[in-house]
Image (cartoon, grey):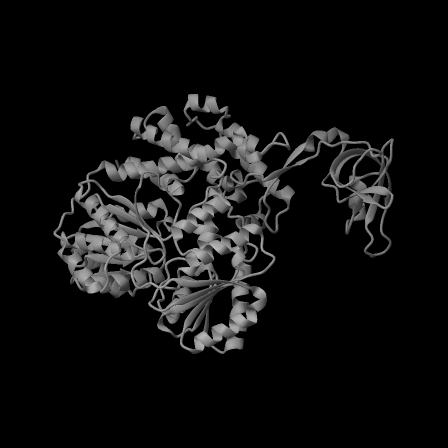
Amino acid sequence: MRPRILYPLFASLTSLPGVGQRTAGALARLGWTRVIDGLWHLPTGVIDRRYSPSLATARAGVIATLTVTVRQHVAPAGHGRQPHRVRCSDETGQLDLVYFRARTETLEQLLPVGAARIVSGVLERYGSGLQMVHPDFVVTPEARDRLPAIEPVYPLTAGVSGRALARVIREAVARAPDLEEWLDAAFRARQGWPAWRQALVAAHAPADAGEELAVTPARSRLAYDELLANQLALALMRHHLRVRAGRTIHVPGHLAAKALSALGFQLTAAQRAAVAEIEGDLASGKRMLRLLQGDVGSGKTVVAVLAMLAVAEAGSQSALLAPTEVLARQHWKTIERIAAAAGVKVALLTGRMAARERSQLLQALADGEIAIVVGTHALVQDAVGFKDLVLAVIDEQHRFGVHQRLALTAKGSSTHVLLMTATPIPRTLTLMIYGDLDVSRLTEKPPGRQPIDTRIVPLDRLDDVIAALGRRLAAGARAYWVCPLVEESEALDVAAAEERAAMLRERMGVRVGVLHGRMKGDARDTVMEAFIAGAIDLLVATTVIEVGVDVPAATVMVIEHAERFGLAQLHQLRGRIGRGAERSTCLLLYAGPLTEAAQARLVVIRDSDDGFRIAEEDLRLRGAGEVLGVRQSGLPAFRLADLDLHADLLAAARDDARLILERDPMLESPRGQALKTLLYLFERDAAVRYIRSG
């Protein structure tokens, strides 16, 4: 259970004063639903209101805080568009405060003639005089302390003003309790960091407009806390998985040999090496926890099947967990085809199965009649049981929470775990994210795969592109058309995709399908299945097709506004084609003029199809934080830490987590108890369950 002291932070946003359903709905667009989400929404800059000149010496174009006397109200005549002007002065000059569409009575109450007021906002030159349009603050001299000298600036969302957002965050920070210290005292003293709550308050109330916010002692402390929670959770997971002996699987490999002979092609050297490493893990007597990292089309599934066949030969069961039904169905077809040659039964379990079919499948799993099962999240439900689950394979593992991985491995005894990802990650970042995980890398493509002809084409040649695509489709090809990212808004992405699909349907007269992230899972699967079956010629999509979709007949991809995408994402998208024996073409449409960085990205993707080289270039061009961004690569993003700025802190957190587990693996010491609170604070709750389960 979450510690009681954290309850106020995990309460609904609407529990804060002044936050109603309307404000909460707007903040939900920022991903906020709870009080703690406000704590982690840190300022990106500051407004300095300390410039307080006389009117005679004031500079236009800057924020100024001025003490003036109200002289006269000049209200607009009738209902025209003229503003309401409030004439003010000090001993040295004149200033007009300008309000559009304001109620005269309200302004006269706020700014009574003859009264002194302190106003703060942007000064502008208007004619020969000075004016301030809609001042940010108007306060009496007695209330001057309510006017912040340094004001934090937060990323905004539609429907909530900056002032309202800051007020919500202040209320959220006020809820933050004093927590027992979880950092090593000597380390914290060396860094010069404040206590957790002091750091939180300071991070939301910067004291100096000139400082680099992300590396202040307060922000560095909070970033380290997040990194430590992450590294400790990963370390606990690995410790838990490795502390118990694994099932020893050592078989002659007859089933794998039968499957390989039926494949019709030889494994690459990298695949053979990965298979040998996995077989070594299975035979070692220790629990396997291995990451199989393979570029798009590198043959990860074949490697996983051979591992599952070894387990089947030993009389035990394997399960493969995939993030979507399309991917699960795709894996099932591939695995069933390979395993059939070895006489091994493979089943598919999804949330859409009929009740009777599902019941029969669950019984067969429980009886051990099924050696290999492929499924979606449905696999981790309580009703699913195995006779003897020995190997859990988790595809695109970053899409699953720790609790889902734990729920699947808990269905067996000392279950071996093989994680798979198609996202190439630079070696340095692999160490950062996956720590001491054993890693196998597939760096070659299977034989027979043709290189993809990638071209960079300006958008003003759109008509030529459509004409050429129409000819390819008329000749029987199938194609993807990827619509651009639009202002980081999924709603606009969807509108762009539907508009483009209508235009292409009209221009080419072909069967066009649309796929986007706002469609329900069933609708998405239906469109994808129609494309796979050939009932759709052209699939217009947002980036939901980025990972795992396998349609060998698709040989053309058009990526519109390719300059808006990151390198890793362009590579993942392009990986949807070139999966059959026919030559494929990828057209990168761009709108000029290109920035230097955008041009460099497009040239890299044109000139290379090596995902690992592209990942290293991505790291060089954009830095670790961007490479790890959710939208660009699918990897988890940190909310407080920036890996470009805090890479040294991540290394320290890894070492700290390792040392903690060596000294106190059950987190029973006073510091260990505080570290449990840290894990709950950053929602690494599943890691605490690892401790409890031994």
The answer to which image quadrant residue 148 occupies is top right
Is 372 drawn above or below residue 246 in the view shown?
Answer: below
The answer to which image quadrant residue 212 occupies is top right
| Residue 126 place in picture, x, y as percent | 83, 45
What's the residue at 33%, 67% (across, down)? 581
Residue 108 visible in this rendered orientation of the protein = yes
Residue 350 visible in this rendered orientation of the protein = no
Total numbered badges shown on the rendered structure: 0
Is 348 drawn above or below residue 436 in the view shown?
Answer: below
Furthest residue in direction front, as rendered: 607
Left or right position of 595 against 383: right
What's the residue at 77%, 52% (across, down)? 101
Give the position of the N terminus as an image quadrant.
Answer: top left
Left or right position of 307 against 154: left
| Residue 607 place in picture, x, y as percent | 45, 57
| Residue 524 place in picture, x, y as percent | 41, 65
| Residue 622 place in picture, x, y as percent | 50, 46
Give the position of the C terminus as an image quadrant.
Answer: top left
Is 604 drawn above or below residue 462 in the view shown?
Answer: above
